[in-house]
Image (cartoon, coloured by chain):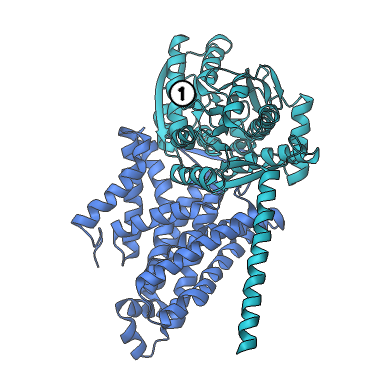
Chain colours: A blue, B cyan
């Protein structure tokens, strides 16, 4: 039993982790809560749906193309909506409200194009491969999800520690103003970060599409868990996002094990409140 | 200056005359068209229900209006969205329909929404017809509240009997959605399963927006039930089935009427093959039912997502039209007429209204096989 609950936590936590990492990237570069970020993940899922089901492309090319396109989507939205607002020195509240608008628009467009009906990616009918280790079972998609989360994390750590781009990003995180003074093209760097963050969010949407399915309204749910994980883990740290995500998933699942299923959301948000009150900088302070 | 003033007065005079004419036109159309309000989850999580309600209503009204309407008057449907069964939105919608649109006959969808808005329709003495709202509590919700949906206590009774007598299953686990519908149905099932000699070995709840249920299912797997009943609100029933199978739960899956939808079949895939579900007596082999479903498919270019809701709504509108034809657009007269409905051959089955304003129809056990909803075979 314990092994299964732990596995469930790993699976759920990995999706949260991907969302949390992507949100952390975007948030630390733009410094405002982008409510539309969840919808970017949904866009990724629906793009792959279009490529595989409507255009008949293979899974792998569709996924790669989908991830890149999602990244581009994120940058385009940033360019059209948020950059002009930031140029005008808009407050965080204004940006937040604008992002809500973007979220609603994207959700509406997806509903119109694809209907609100539930859609799945991949082999619709059959169950797919199921693995069992030490009385804990998980599917192929679950395994891919866990590996993806950890790989993305490792990949980003390597980039940020060892490449020039990584140094620029760290400088930007420290202080945007000083970075500009030193000659860093902050605008371009932020755009790259948004591209990466949106592409990663797309991965979350695609994986969810293969595992549980797609619907236009799933964006907010994904985003909320990502935000809670980020805040619990520590907003300025990728490691924090990862730890926060797995911690959140574990508390939720072990909570359901002992309490009742209806408490899941209450546990997640209750945990958030506890952290905000007692340890607002998160598990990993920076 | 002089000329300008004259032009001004002339313009104002024209506007006054025109608005007077327009007012008369509106009054004329008020006299001509009968209003029926429809509150349904047109957008959001339950949008496929709303789509089905809309489809059933529009097809019924198209048919009625194309033959001249009711006693020469056409029916106007006024749609209001209650945003995925939100109770506040439903209250706002019914208030608008009754007070602003002056609609004395309204359809309301979703169990929770009906319970929330029933007091309003009672006080206003307007008719509320429910084409999709099955929780048992609606029976007592009001004198002016009627429904073509079968009440859950009837479904629970028939289903429990079937499980005990025909399937001979005793140890049952239940996973259900935590809302008015789910909790109500669970309570009905608990009583009926015990009455029939069965035992609920584990019950687990989940929130309507949840997408993964692995830990609840792990708890259930641990008690080794002989069957799993899934009381779902929408397509997540299929996801629950899929995750149950993935976890190694191989027992018979049993669902309620919300489980028996094309959406659940799509979401579940192979996992729901062989699952049975209790549903209203919609029989696709009946000509009038098939005619309705074909009309829907032709009009909207895809099969109805929730076919019995289309049929229930269609029957609701047609019953109301018959009532208006007999008693006029008069809530009290319509109320008396509806209580007297007996053996009405509707697209959703043969309907008799009981003293609570509930449709009494036989229920059916059906099955999902190869992604299709079919009649049950052992």
Residue B206 falls in which quadrant of the image?
top left
Which residue occupies the foreground of this view, B38 or A174? B38
Q: What percent of the width, then of the height, locates residue B207?
A: 42, 39
Q: Position of residue A33 (x, y in %)?
A: 38, 66
On the image, which quarter does residue B327 sit in? top right
Residue sitting at x 23%, y 60%: A280
* Quadrant the N terminus of chain B occupies: bottom right
Subunit of mark 1? B
Q: Is residue A128 visible?
A: no
Q: Could you tell whether B171 is left or right of B102 in the image?
A: left
> Looking at the image, which is closer to me, B211 or B182?
B182
Q: Nearer the viewer, residue B177 or B137?
A: B137
Viewer-proximal residue among A54 and A36: A36
B73 lies above or below A272: above
The quarter of the rendered structure image containing the C terminus of chain B is top right
**Position of B323 compared to B121: left or right?**
right
């Amino acid at each position: 039993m314990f092994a299964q609950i732990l596995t469930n936590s790993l699976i759920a936590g990995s999706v949260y982790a991907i969302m949390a990492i992507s949100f952390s990237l975007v948030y630390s570069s733009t410094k405002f809560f982008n409510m539309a970020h969840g919808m970017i993940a949904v866009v990724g899922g629906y793009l792959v749906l279009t490529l595989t089901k409507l255009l008949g492309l293979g899974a792998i090319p569709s996924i790669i193309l989908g991830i890149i396109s999602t990244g581009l989507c994120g940058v385009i939205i940033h360019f059209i909506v948020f950059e002009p607002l930031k140029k005008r020195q808009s407050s965080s509240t204004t940006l937040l409200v604008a992002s809500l608008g973007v979220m609603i628009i994207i959700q509406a467009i997806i509903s119109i194009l694809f209907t609100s009906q539930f859609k799945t990616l991949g082999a619709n009918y059959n169950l797919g491969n199921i693995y069992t280790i030490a009385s804990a079972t998980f599917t192929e998609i679950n395994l891919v999800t866990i590996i993806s989360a950890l790989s993305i994390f490792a990949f980003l750590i390597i980039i940020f520690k060892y490449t020039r781009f990584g140094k620029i990003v760290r400088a930007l995180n420290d202080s945007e103003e000083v970075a500009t003074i030193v000659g860093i093209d902050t605008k371009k760097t932020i755009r790259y970060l948004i591209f990466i963050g949106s592409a990663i969010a797309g991965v979350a949407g695609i994986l969810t599409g293969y595992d549980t399915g797609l619907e236009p309204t799933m964006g907010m749910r994904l985003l909320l868990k990502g935000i809670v994980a980020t805040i619990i883990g520590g907003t300025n740290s990728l490691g924090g996002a990862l730890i926060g995500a797995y911690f959140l998933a574990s508390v939720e699942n072990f909570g359901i094990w002992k309490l009742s299923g209806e408490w899941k959301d209450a546990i997640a948000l209750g945990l958030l409140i506890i952290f905000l009150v007692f340890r607002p900088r998160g598990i990993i302070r920076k | 200056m002089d000329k300008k003033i004259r032009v001004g007065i002339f313009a104002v005079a024209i506007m006054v005359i025109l608005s007077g004419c327009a007012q008369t036109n509106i009054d004329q159309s008020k006299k001509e068209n009968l209003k029926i309000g429809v509150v349904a989850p047109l957008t959001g999580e339950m949008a496929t229900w709303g789509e089905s309600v809309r489809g059933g209503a529009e097809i019924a009204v198209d048919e009625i209006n194309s033959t001249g309407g009711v006693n020469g008057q056409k029916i106007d449907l006024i749609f209001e969205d209650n945003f995925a069964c939100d109770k506040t939105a439903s209250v706002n919608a019914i208030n608008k329909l009754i007070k602003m649109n002056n609609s004395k006959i309204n359809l309301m969808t979703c169990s929770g929404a009906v319970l929330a808005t029933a007091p309003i329709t009672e006080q206003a003495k307007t008719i509320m017809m429910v084409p999709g709202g099955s929780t048992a509590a609606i029976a007592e919700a009001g004198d002016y509240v009627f429904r073509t949906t079968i009440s859950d206590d009837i479904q629970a009774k028939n289903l429990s009997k079937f499980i005990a007598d025909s399937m001979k299953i005793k140890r049952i686990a239940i996973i259900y959605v935590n809302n008015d519908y789910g909790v109500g149905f669970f309570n009905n099932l608990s009583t009926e399963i015990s009455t029939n000699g069965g035992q609920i070995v584990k019950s687990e709840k989940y929130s309507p927006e949840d997408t993964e249920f692995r830990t609840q299912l792990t708890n259930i797997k641990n008690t080794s039930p002989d069957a799993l009943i899934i009381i779902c609100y929408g397509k997540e029933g299929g996801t629950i089935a899929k995750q149950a199978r993935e976890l190694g739960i191989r027992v018979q899956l049993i669902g309620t009427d919300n489980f028996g939808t094309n959406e659940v079949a799509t979401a579940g895939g192979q996992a729901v093959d062989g699952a049975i579900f209790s549903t209203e007596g919609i029989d696709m082999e009946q000509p009038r039912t098939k005619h309705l479903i074909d009309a829907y498919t032709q009009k909207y270019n895809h099969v109805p997502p929730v076919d019995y809701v289309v049929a229930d709504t269609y029957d609701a509108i047609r019953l109301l039209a018959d009532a208006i034809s007999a008693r006029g657009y008069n809530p009290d007269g319509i109320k008396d007429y509806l209580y007297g409905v007996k053996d009405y051959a509707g697209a959703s089955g043969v309907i008799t209204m009981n003293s609570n304003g509930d449709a009494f129809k036989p229920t059916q056990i059906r099955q999902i096989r190869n992604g299709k909803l079919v009649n049950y075979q052992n």
